[in-house]
Image (cartoon, rainbow, N blue to C red):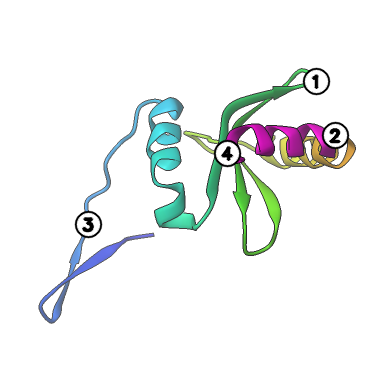
Amino acid sequence: MPIFKIEGKTLVSVKELQIDLEKDIQNLTEANLELVFDLKFISSEFSLHNFRIDTLAFDDENNSFVIIEYKRDRSFSIIDQGYAYLYLMLNNKADFILEYNEKTVRV
């Protein structure tokens, strides 16, 4: 889908930039989570029970955790991975809350 910017009264196509590594996408997203998605950054590469979540964030408006998984290319296994992360979160709520508290609560 093309993206445009406004220049005066004209729409100008924005050129797509190729990003070579998923880690580059992750770093850019994490650095701009609040600005773009209004999410609070919690953790990068959060590991729990043989799973590694790329980015763990928190949505204050909905009072819920947000898991972001980066894919450079299309992947049909992303749905299965999403279900696995949902199961992980539902069965390990205390671990997610602990991570949130450790990263956000200041004494």
Residue type marked 2: Asn
- The Cα–Cα distance between marks 4 and 1, rounded to whole angstroms, is 27 Å
Quadrant for the N terminus in the image? bottom left
Residue labelled with disc 1: 49
x then y, percent, for residue 24 = 38, 29
Residue type marked 1: His
The tag earlier along the polypeptide, 4 or 1, is: 1
Between tags 2 and 3, which lies in front?
Answer: 2
Residue 14: numbered disc: 3
Q: Quadrant of residue 89?
A: top right
Q: Quadrant of residue 86?
A: top right
Q: Tags 2 and 3 in contact by the CB under 8 Å rule? A: no
Residue drawn at x 54%, y 48% is: 40
In the image, taking residue 90 as reference, residue 70 lies left or right, namely: left
- The Cα–Cα distance between marks 1 and 3, rounded to whole angstroms, is 42 Å
- The Cα–Cα distance between marks 3 and 4, rounded to whole angstroms, is 41 Å
Q: Tags 1 and 3 in contact by the CB under 8 Å rule? A: no
How many numbered discs? 4
Quadrant for the C terminus in the image? top right
The tag earlier along the polypeptide, 1 or 3, is: 3
- The Cα–Cα distance between marks 2 and 1, rounded to whole angstroms, is 10 Å
The tag earlier along the polypeptide, 3 or 4, is: 3
Is 97 in the magenta? yes
Residue drawn at x 25%, y 65% is: 4
In the image, the segment drawn in magenta is 92-107
- The Cα–Cα distance between marks 2 and 3, rounded to whole angstroms, is 42 Å
Residue labelled with disc 2: 92
Between tags 4 and 1, which lies in front?
Answer: 4
